[in-house]
Amino acid sequence: MNNWLPRENCLEKTYTFANFEAAMLFMQQAAIKISELDHHPTWTNTYNRIHVLLQTHDAGNSVTEKDRELAQILDTLFLSV
């Protein structure tokens, strides 16, 4: 997990892309992995940036192994976009 910031009860990261289209491609590709994992982030998009918060709601809104696994998946995907 690269550059994830531990915040109170979550992991936080902002990805920056070359343009809006690349950011949207990342979100579309990530959606497939997210559905497979059945663990959904809180994320927002502003032009070429995607801001992500990860926490497990079923575990009292805390950081769990599911969050770390999703963070790794998103980092790997980011390197391929």
Image: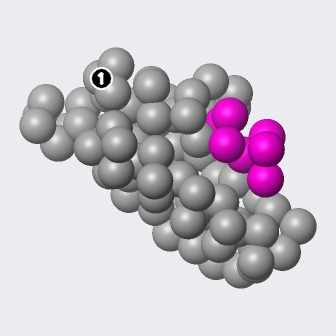
Left or right for 27, reference 32: right
**Nearest the camera: 6 or 15?**
15
Q: Main SS of the magenta segment?
A: helix
Q: Which residue is mark 1?
A: 64
- In the displayed structure, 19 sits above or below 40; it is below
- Counting from the top left corner in percent of width and height, residue 42 is at 38, 57
Say what amino acid the circle numbered 1 marks. Thr
Displayed quadrant of residue 59: top left
Left or right for 35, reference 4: left
78 magenta-colored? yes
Residue that appears at 34% across and 50% down: 35
Residue that appears at 45% across and 25% down: 69
**Nearest the camera: 54 or 32?**
32
Displayed quadrant of residue 61: top left
**Nearest the camera: 28 or 9?**
28
- In the displayed structure, 68 sits above or below 13; it is above
- Counting from the top left corner in percent of width and height, residue 21 is at 76, 77
Are there few (<14), some (14-19), or many (20+) residues within 10 Å of tag 1? Answer: some
Displayed quadrant of residue 25: bottom right
Q: Is residue 8 visible?
A: no
Left or right for 48, reference 24: right
- Counting from the top left corner in percent of width and height, residue 13 is at 59, 45
> What is the secondary structure assignment of the residue under circle 1?
loop
